[in-house]
């Protein structure tokens, strides 16, 4: 890679419900990470679609849309613009073990578990693919649209995130599939949902989520996806990755144990892995039930308008839905 940013342009999300107990991720970036991050827009509407259900929720602020890519307002370029006195060398293929002999500290933040695997510190939870496209149509710039349907999502989900009212990115997250299977499900998604957006460009990315242990080996730190920052449930990883980078620096400068600094991240991802395992057991009836629950009076306020740690209870709720579905079958 010879540039700052992401190779594939798209819009990512920060959802408050997933970031708890952090109340506002942008304020957290400012207060804890000393980074001023500007979003593309605020998420004010969540549209959930399953095979037979649709629930639309509205709020002043569900979270934020962030631009990913090479543009000056994309997330990584914003972060880079706030880093001082740091030389970046492109076109290098550094060997981590060699660097560890030459420098006091090495931080592995290459967005991949490959180096972590060399140290036998990686346990894979899920692998798969993200298939996506940049599309044109008419959009609500504050609306996040999500779909779950076993016929094309398998154990994943699809989502649409707008740049503005004319352009959006649409992606299908598919764990446990091959690249060829991902292409097939992408075609099925468009056909079943009868999508008619104009495609500007398409992309496909390999996706990993796993558990790193330990996160520091001698003078080598693992952060971001190399440190297991990507959520095993929905595949989110921005907040974790940035936080781990900042905490690795804090550990180096202040001598604080890195594992202690990132413990809350690790605990949350373990809880999300339990949710992932429960979610994997759902069929389309289960998906309908999950979406239907969101439409119950009071559930939206409880889940989205309070600071209750939903991840703590979600795995149990999904397990109950699984059991109910099994009873209905029998």
Image (tube, rainbow, N blue to C red):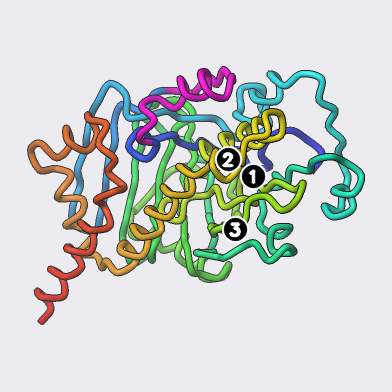
Query: What label does residue 213 carry, if any?
Result: 3
Give how far across and how far down residue 49 sits, in percent: 26, 49
Give how far across and how far down residue 157 sits, in percent: 38, 54
Q: Where, quadrant-wise, is the C terminus in this rendering?
A: bottom left
Q: Which residue is mark 2?
A: 241
Q: Residue at x 58, y 34 (%)?
A: 242
Give how far across and how far down residue 172 sits, in percent: 46, 54
Alpha carbon distance from label 1 to label 3: 12 Å
Dot 3, crowdedness within 10 Å: few (<14), some or many (≥20)?
some
Asked where in the image residue 324 lies, by quadrant, the reply is bottom left
Q: Is residue 35 magenta?
A: yes
Front-most of 127 and 259? 259
Query: What label does residue 223 carry, if any?
Result: 1
Callout 2 secondary element = helix
Magenta part of the protein: which range?
A: 20-41
- Tell which circle, 2 or 1, labels the residue nearer the N-terminal end: 1
Callout 1 secondary element = loop
Dot 1, crowdedness within 10 Å: few (<14), some or many (≥20)?
many
Alpha carbon distance from label 3 to label 2: 16 Å
Alpha carbon distance from label 2 to label 1: 6 Å
Classify 79 as above or below 48.
above
Q: Residue at x 39, y 25 (%)?
A: 24
């Amino acid at each position: 890679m010879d540039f700052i940013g992401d190779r594939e342009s798209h819009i990512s999300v920060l959802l408050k419900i997933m970031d708890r107990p952090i109340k506002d991720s942008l304020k957290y970036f400012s207060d804890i990470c000393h980074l001023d991050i500007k979003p593309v827009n605020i998420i004010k509407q969540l549209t959930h679609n399953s095979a037979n259900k649709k629930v639309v929720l509205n709020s002043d602020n569900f979270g934020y849309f962030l631009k990913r890519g090479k543009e000056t307002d994309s997330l990584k370029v914003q972060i880079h613009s706030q880093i001082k006195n740091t030389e970046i060398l492109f076109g290098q293929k550094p060997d981590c073990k060699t660097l560890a002999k030459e420098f006091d500290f090495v931080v592995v933040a290459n967005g991949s578990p490959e180096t972590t695997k060399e140290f036998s510190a990686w346990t894979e939870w899920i692998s798969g693919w993200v298939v996506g496209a940049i599309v044109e149509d008419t959009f609500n710039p504050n609306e996040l649209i999500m779909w779950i349907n076993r016929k094309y999502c398998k154990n994943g989900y699809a989502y649409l995130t707008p740049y503005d009212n004319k352009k959006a990115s649409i992606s299908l997250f598919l764990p446990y599939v091959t690249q060829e299977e991902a292409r097939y499900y992408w075609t099925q998604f468009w056909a079943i949902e009868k999508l008619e957006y104009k495609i500007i460009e398409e992309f496909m990315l390999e996706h990993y989520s796993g558990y790193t242990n330990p996160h520091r080996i001698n003078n080598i730190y693992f952060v971001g996806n190399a440190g297991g920052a990507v959520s095993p449930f929905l595949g989110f990883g921005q907040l974790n990755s940035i936080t781990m980078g900042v905490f690795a620096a804090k550990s180096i400068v202040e001598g604080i144990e890195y594992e202690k600094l990132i413990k809350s991240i690790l605990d949350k991802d373990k809880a999300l892995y339990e949710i992932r395992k429960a979610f994997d057991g759902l069929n389309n009836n289960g998906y309908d039930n999950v979406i239907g629950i969101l439409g119950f009076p009071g559930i939206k306020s409880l889940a989205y308008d309070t600071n209750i740690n939903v991840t703590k209870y979600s795995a149990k709720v999904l397990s109950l839905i699984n059991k109910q579905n099994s009873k209905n079958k029998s």
